[in-house]
Structure formats: structure tokens, C-alpha cells
Amino acid sequence: MRPDILFPLFAPVTSLPGIGPRFAKLFAKLTGEKVVDLCWHRPSGIVDRRLSPKLADAPENAIVTLTVVVGRHRKPASPRLPWKVRCSDETGTIDLVFFNAKEDYLAKTLPEGETRVVSGRVERYGSELQMIHPDHIVKPGEIDRLLRIEPTYPLTAGLTPKLVGRAVQAAVERAPALFEWLDPAFQSRRGWAGWQESLRRLHAPQSLDDLSPEQPERARLAYDELLANQIALALVRLQQKRRTGRRLAGDGSLRGRLVAALPYRLTASQAQAIEEIAGDMAAPAPMVRLLQGDVGSGKTVVALLAMAIAAEAGAQAALLAPTEILARQHFATIDPLARAAGLEIALLTGRDRGKARTGILTGLAEGRLRLAVGTHALLQEDVEFKDLGLAVVDEQHRFGVHQRLLLAEKGQSPDVLVMTATPIPRTLMMTAYGDLETSRLTEKPAGRRPIDTRTLPLERLEEVVGGVERAIRQGARVYWICPLVQESELVDLANAEARAADLKRRLGPRIGLVHGQQKAAERDAAMAGFAAGEIDLLVATTVVEVGVDVPAATVMVIEHAERFGLAQLHQLRGRIGRSDKPSTCLLLYQAPLGETARARLKIMRETDDGFRIAEEDLRLRGAGELLGTRQSGMPEFRLADLAVHGELLAAARDDAKLILDRDPDLAGPRGKALRTLLYLFERDAVVKTLRSG
Ligand code: ADP
Ligand code: MG
């Protein structure tokens, strides 16, 4: 149960003064629906209202706070003209100016003959001073509320700065003092205030410097958020380790036959990854291991050998791929090898229906089929395994955490191997998995040639088409990637279709098209034609981004490369350079390039090291955008900025480990404070798994 002390923070924003259901909807969009969400809404600027001169001394175009006597209201002759209220002090006069004025409101807030404090920007209009739409109008007794440096906040349409500022302030006032969860020595070394004090200071910046993410109050709150994240992950890991898994150790017979059937030798890092996986599988605790390897580093065969271990031990194994194309491609790679080793492997995708599907389901339920490859169709409720010992999840960033768990639930705590081709920076990995065991494939299979990457303005498209034509005449196979227009596949498709038609006119009929809106059969046919060399050039939307493997393709053209993220460009480019022939990648951009876009394309030219590209991407774009956080299953942070707070993350990880080593059930006094922290950052589910409490 959430501690009582946090209740005011988790009340809906409508519990704050002046916020009804209509504004609540807008706040839901801007910040979130709860009071605590407003506490996390960080100021983005400041307005200094401390200057409080007499009218004669008021500097033009400055923000000032004035004490004036309200004089005559001058109603405009036409509603299109402004309403003016003449005010004065003993040194001069000023007009307060209102467009679309409401008479009642003005009469009430500015009664003639009374003294009021107004704050806003002073301007000169002809010979008169004026203030258009004062930001604040209060009674003289309330002047202290205005004479300060006021934080300003990001807004959304329909919410005024004043409303948001007040609501956030009210929310922050609700924030209670909480028992300190930080280690006292650590806290004093950092010079951090308590939680409540830090939150207040975050919302009371005194200078532009105070808005920096490196300020101590922001750092403290970011640390709290990261600590909650790391403790939650560590608790999940503890749970996993407490569950009894099983030992899956094979005799190596299937592996031996598979390796013998391979047309190549394993690289050293492939062999090492398989060793590490075998070690985990043979241990009693369930494995959760990440296999990280750049595109083309050869993860599939590692997965297959891991699956063979499960089969040797008498259990089943499943490989889950994010798309139909990939599932089929994995199957096409794995099936002949598995056959050579005497293993039958099933393919299950959304397209399999009726008898064929029933046959596979029975085979899996009875255990006759040991290995399965498939899409999310493998996760459907009626898919049962007799004894699933290993689940491999490929290209994991396409799956949410939820789906990963679903597959794991199909067995009794099966071992889980997560494969990712996106070289996720270490910092991000840590926030999504904590200290997950990781195997990395660091070398490319032997014989690969580096890719020659060039950048060209789109104006040189004609030249590019000419070059592509020559390359095709010399036997090259070419990917042509169409621009990403927006988040809409349909618009992207229109582009791809137009480009394909255009290239057909220029280069003849041996041109194919693949995109996400196609029927799977049509797309497979195009891919197969390209793989077989019946098609020379494949126009594609980003559906070829992940995993597609046609080693003979050696040229890639990417239109409007500046619109793609770095990680995505790297993924796309990884489709070529897969054979012993030299490959070329042409990045066409729309000139002029902005600074960030230029930096990105430069990195693409300089390196094909996926890890370096990922780190640069994080630096250039920030974590949120890196993977499209929502779909990626990566956590989003309100206060922490991983591009800045990487060091805090590492500290939080170490802290979490120490805390749980000493008090795994968070039962001691600091443990109790930490439980409150977990609730504060909405890790309720994890607290519920603790033994006591
Ligand atoms: P990814 O890590 O991108 O999933 P794949 O598993 O698709 O990479 O492998 C890419 C290509 O490299 C495939 O054609 C595969 O057959 C080949 N390959 C894998 N391992 C080796 C190796 N050790 N030596 C040579 N080629 C290999
Ligand atoms: Mg792959």
C-alpha cells in the first residue's frame, strides 16, 4: 500500500485550487494527471519581477512591478480597439491596456480609486507609458508574492503561464517532508539538501544557471529517480534468482554436428558468447542474458547453438522475431543447419492458419517439435509448449517488456536470451535491465570489407542514378531507401512508390518494392527475388532496417538521410557490407544542413562502430528520442537526463546493490524510507513483491 504521507501527491490535479475537469484534461497532456506530475514539471525559464520603480523611473521594455492608484477606465469606441485603464503614482501615469476585455472582470480587478500592484512589461506608446495585459494584478498587501524571480514553465495550448505557475507552486507546497533515504555520508559529500527542500529549490530558480541539469537540487532529484529505477530492477533480479530454474546442460552432440555443418568458422567472440550462455544455462538460476552485437556480427548462429543446448538437455527452445520477414529469414538460415544436425524446427507466424497451424501447435504441446521460430504468433494463448527451456528474443527493442514476460511465462522460468542489434549505450542498458549479464560480439565475421560511405546533396540525384546504373551493369545489387516523411507509413509509401516508378522508367523492369503496407506474400516475393538476383534494385521504406540479410547487396542509397536517426542509419547501412566485395553507401541530404544533422552525417562517414554511433546519438539527441522510448520498453525519466547524469546512474546502481545486499527486503529504517521512494516514483508493483510489507 502506498504510504499515507504520499496521498496528497497522488491525488488528481483537480484537488488543486482553480483546476477543474477542463484544465485537468490539459494538464493530463502537459504533465500527467496527478499532483506529483506537476512537481516533476521543471521550470524552463525565469522572469525577474524584483524591480519596483516609481513610474518616472520605470525603464522601457523591462519587467517591473508597480504600485499604482487605479484611475479612469476608458471603454473603446469599437470592440476591436483596446480597453485602457489610466493609473498613476505621485511621479507619473501609465495606461494598462487590454484587448478583448471583459468589462465585469476589469471592473472587479481594477476598481477606480483603489491601489493595486501590477507586474508586467512597460512600453512607451507615443508619449505615454503603457503595460499591455499585465501578468499579475494583486492587492497591495500581496506585493511580496510578486517581488521575486518567477519560474516559467513549458506550456500547452489552453493553459496560461500564470495558471501553470500557480498550479505547480500549489503542487510543490503539498510535497511533504519525507524520511531521508540517501546514505548520510554520500548526501553530505555531494552537498545535497533533503528531498522536499530540493524540490522547492528546483522550482525557485534564482538565475538561468539554476536551470542547468547539473545544479545540486536537480542532481539530487535525478539521483532519487535513478535510485528508484535501479532498486526496482535489482529487486526484479533478486526475484528471478530466488525462483528455482533448472540446469540445462547438454552433451554437446547437437552442437558438434551444427558447428560441423557451418560453412564458416565461429569468430572468437561468437565462441565466447556460446560459452557464457552455456554456463548460465547449466546453472540452477534462470538465465537472463543479453546478446549484444552490431548488425552482421552473426547473432543468429549463437542463438541456434543456445537452442541446441536446450534440445540436448531434452527441453524445447523458441526464437521470437519482431517481423514476419525476419522470422522467415531466421527460419531459412536455421532450418538447413538444424536438419544437418538431425533436428526438426517449426515456423509459426500470423500467416499460418488451419491444419498447418494445428499440426505445429500439437507438435509443440506434445514436445515432438523441439525448436520453434516465429513472430508474436508464438505468444498467443493457445500456443503451449511441453517444456520450454529457453526463450530467445531477437531485436528486442521492438518488443515491450510485457511481451518478453509473456514468452517467459510459457515455460517454468525458462532461460531467456535477449538479442539486440541496436548497440544500446551502456547507460541506457543499465536503466532498462540493471546489471544484466551481457555477451558482446565485438568482431565482424572474417572477410568483411568496410563500407565506403559518402554524403551528397539531393541535387546530385541524377548523378547518383547514373552511378547506380553503372554499378548494376557490373552486377551489383542495390537497396534504395526512401525518405522518412513522418510517422505515417502511408505517406512514406507514396514516396517509395513514386521513386520505384521513376527508377523503372530509367533503369528498366528489374526493380522491386517492399514496404510495410504490403501483403506479407508480396513482400516476401520481392525479397526473395532480390536475394536470388532476379531483381537488381530494391526500393524500400525502413522495413529493411532490421536484420534482413542479402549478402550479395553492395550498394545502398538513402534519400533524405538527414531525416533519419543515427541508430537507424546504422541499422540500414548494416544491410550491405556483408560479403567480401567492397560496398558503398550514399547518404543523400537536403541542403542546407543544420548543425546537428551535419554532425550526424559526419559520424556516419567516419565510423561504422555501432557502439560509438550509439553513444554519439545519445549525446546529440538525448535518451528519450534515441529509440523511440515508448515502443522500446526503455524507461522514461522525468528528472534524470542520461546524457548528463550518466555518472549519477552508475552511483545509483552501486548504491542499489549495496542496499539490497544488506537489506534485501527493505525492512530496516532506511529500507522503509526507500519503500516510500519506490512509491514516489511509482514502482508500486515491485514493492508488492517484497516479503514483509
Ligand atoms: P546479425 O548479428 O546481424 O543478426 P546474422 O546472424 O544475420 O547477423 O549474420 C550475418 C551474416 O554473417 C549471415 O550471412 C551469416 O551466415 C554470416 N556469419 C555469421 N557468423 C559468421 C562467421 N563466423 N563467419 C562468416 N560468416 C558468418
Ligand atoms: Mg539478426
Image: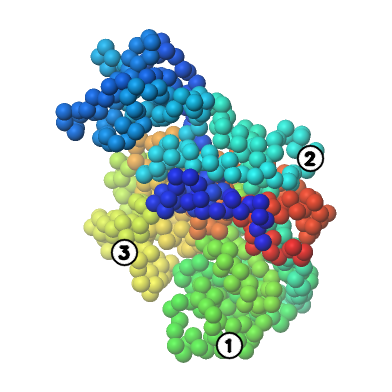
Please determine whether, in this image, residue 88 is positioned above or below residue 224.
Answer: above
CB contact under 8 Å: marks 3 and 1: no
Is residue 100 toward the left or the right of residue 119 in the image?
left
Is disc 1 placed on a helix, strand or loop?
A: helix
Please name the residue shown 74% across and 50% down the image.
673
Is residue 193 toward the left or the right of residue 79 in the image?
right
Please determine whether, in this image, residue 172 is positioned above or below residue 682.
Answer: above
**Whole-Å distance between the Cαs marked 2 and 1?**
59 Å
Q: Quadrant of residue 498?
A: bottom left
Q: Quadrant of residue 537?
A: bottom left
Q: In which quarter of the image is residue 463?
A: top left
Please provide percent x and percent y for residue 77. Answer: 16, 28
Quarter of the image with the C terminus in it:
bottom right
Quarter of the image with the N terminus in it:
bottom right
Please determine whether, in this image, residue 386 is positioned above or below residue 413.
Answer: below
Residue holding disc 1 = 363
Please provide percent x and percent y for residue 682. Answer: 61, 55
Q: Residue flagged by tag 2: what amino acid is it?
A: Pro
Q: Residue flagged by tag 1: what amino acid is it?
A: Gly
Question: Which is more N-terminal, label 1 or label 2?
Answer: 2
